[in-house]
Image: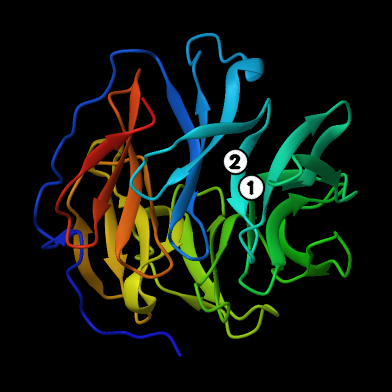
């Protein structure tokens, strides 16, 4: 059961203004990032030519959790995510007919297509038991969330209804999935469901635009929320939809380590980006990936 206790880790009070951290100087973009299942390593996708957006310069890096010992493991693909055992990555790879979901074995550097051949939106995530959740659009249908096995089998649709579903994410214990639904009215909402799609629960403010959900420490959920573009901030909520706190730094998106002790996040000035890690209490922000 997900906890609903108020916590204040790496977050300020709900009324606090997020701090601004340095970016640049080069036009680099960080397209995705996250911690390994044991919280000891990170993976991130770095685009060194953010001006021309050349996919050939989009590299996937693996490093220690503090950003040290970084190395490129593959190139030309985006949005890497760890598998449940930490031995492989999954990512989206463009093809001539759309997008392909692939698995990359880190030790052997072997890529395997899952053969789904779907238009995938918002990447894919893998649970600790190696079940994948992803958002995809089927022919002439709205985008919904699906799950499948690590080899692309046993595909199951878990969201239904009006609107597009985006960015599904697993809770660290694999018992919940969060995603956001776009209805076209500018008021996207965060939903939490069971892995089979049952017990849907909306936890976001219906008057605001909410997106990019992530499970935080102690079963909380963080996501971007705003009324206007200039008022956006990352909020930490409990399962009852109560705002607990605001993330201490102004960021594009945030990912928490599975053990709840660290966070990784990107900052941007609209043209350049930088990637940071920090402790769970918000202390020690360290720029990485330079």
Q: Nearer the viewer, residue 71 or 243?
A: 71
- Tell me if mark 1 has few (under 14), some (14-19) or many (20+) residues whose alpha carbon lies within 10 angstroms of its own: many
Image position of 58 with respect to 234: above or below: above
Asked whether, in this view, residue 114 is left or right of residue 69, the answer is right
- Tell me if mark 2 has few (under 14), some (14-19) or many (20+) residues whose alpha carbon lies within 10 angstroms of its own: many
Location of residue 187 in the rendering, given as x and y in whole percent from the top left corner: 44, 53
Q: Nearer the viewer, residue 119 or 171?
A: 171
What colour scheme has been applied to the protein in the rendered image?
rainbow
Disc assigned to residue 73:
none
Location of residue 209 in the rendering, given as x and y in whole percent from the top left corner: 39, 51
Asked which quadrant contains residue 210, the reply is bottom left
Location of residue 30 in the rendering, given as x and y in whole percent from the top left corner: 45, 31
Q: Nearer the viewer, residue 208 or 28?
A: 28
Asked which quadrant contains residue 100, the reply is top right
Distance from disc 2 to disc 1, alpha carbons, whole Å, reads: 6 Å
Q: Nearer the viewer, residue 240 or 5?
A: 5
Residue tagged 1? 123
Q: Which image quadrant: the C terminus?
A: top left
Image position of 60 with respect to 290: above or below: below
């Amino acid at each position: 059961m997900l906890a609903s206790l108020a916590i204040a880790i790496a977050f300020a009070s709900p009324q606090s203004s997020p701090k601004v951290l340095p970016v640049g100087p080069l036009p680099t973009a960080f397209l995705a990032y996250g911690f390994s299942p044991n919280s000891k390593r990170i993976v991130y996708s770095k685009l060194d030519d953010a001006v021309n957006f050349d996919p050939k310069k989009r590299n996937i890096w693996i490093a220690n959790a503090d950003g040290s010992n970084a190395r490129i493991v593959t190139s030309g693909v985006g949005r890497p995510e760890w598998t449940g055992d930490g031995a492989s990555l999954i990512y989206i790879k463009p093809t001539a007919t759309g997008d392909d979901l692939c698995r990359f074995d880190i030790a052997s550097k072997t890529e395997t297509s899952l053969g789904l051949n779907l238009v995938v939106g918002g990447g894919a995530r893998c649970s600790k038991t190696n079940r994948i959740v992803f958002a995809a659009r089927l022919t002439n249908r709205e985008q919904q969330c699906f799950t499948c096995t690590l080899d692309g089998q046993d595909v199951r649709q878990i969201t239904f209804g009006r609107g597009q579903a985006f960015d599904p994410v697993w809770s660290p214990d694999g018992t919940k999935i969060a995603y956001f639904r776009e209805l076209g009215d500018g008021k996207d909402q965060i939903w939490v469901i069971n892995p089979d799609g049952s017990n849907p629960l909306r936890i976001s403010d219906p008057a605001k635009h909410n997106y990019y959900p992530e499970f935080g420490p102690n079963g909380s959920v963080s996501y971007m929320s705003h009324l206007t573009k200039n008022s956006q901030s990352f909020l930490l909520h409990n399962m009852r939809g109560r705002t607990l706190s605001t993330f201490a730094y102004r960021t594009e998106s945030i990912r928490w380590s599975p053990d709840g002790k660290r966070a990784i996040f990107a900052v941007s000035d609209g043209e350049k980006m930088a990637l940071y890690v920090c402790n769970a209490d918000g202390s020690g922000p360290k720029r990485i990936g330079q």
